[in-house]
Amino acid sequence: MARASRAGQSFFERPDVRRIRRYSLAEEALNLIEAEDARRPSIDNLASRLGISSRLLEYVFNAWCGVAPSQYILAARLTRVRRALNTSEPERTVTQVASAAEFHHFGRFSSQYRRFCGETPSMTLRRARRRCADAA
């Protein structure tokens, strides 16, 4: 038992350095994704910027966030689009907002948005325009 003790801590009381490192990697990845704003970061690019393999990034992300990094990136991008639709100028279209967020396949975008937000992008935009008209 004396061998397991280090600096007055038992084996079970010492912090798990790997767990702390994985948490820190997940936090760094989340910060990078949020900093990308409208761009679509790739898993390989994120892993490279963190100095780890893509597989380790997937593992860490799943362990700490409960979803794959690609799912989180998509959710972050869709959230940004929803925010943009809710606050956009009246003359902006769904296509313009989606293009600005680097969604280029509009049918797929619309279906992903509907699955994520529970309504179509045009419904979100219409409701936002109604709110603006009512406020004016």
Image: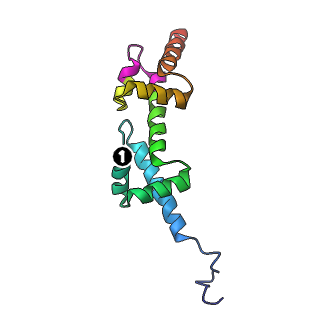
Rendered location of residue 85, percent (x, y): 45, 23
Residue type, mark 1 in image? Ser
Residue 83 at least partly seen? no
Kindly indicate the quadrant of the structure image that contains residue 105.
top left
- Would residue 15 be counted in the magenta stretch? no
Label 1, secondary structure: give it: loop
Q: Residues within 10 Å of mark 1 (few under 14, many from 20)?
A: some
The magenta stretch is 84-96
The image shows residue 26 at horizontal and vertical percentages of: 48, 55
Q: Is residue 39 left or right of residue 71?
A: left
Residue 39 visible in the shown view: yes
Number of residue marks: 1
Q: Which residue is mark 1?
A: 42
The residue drawn where x is 64% and y is 75% is 13
Does 23 appear above or below 83? below
Q: Residue at x 33, y 56 (%)?
A: 48
Residue found at x 48% / y 30%: 112
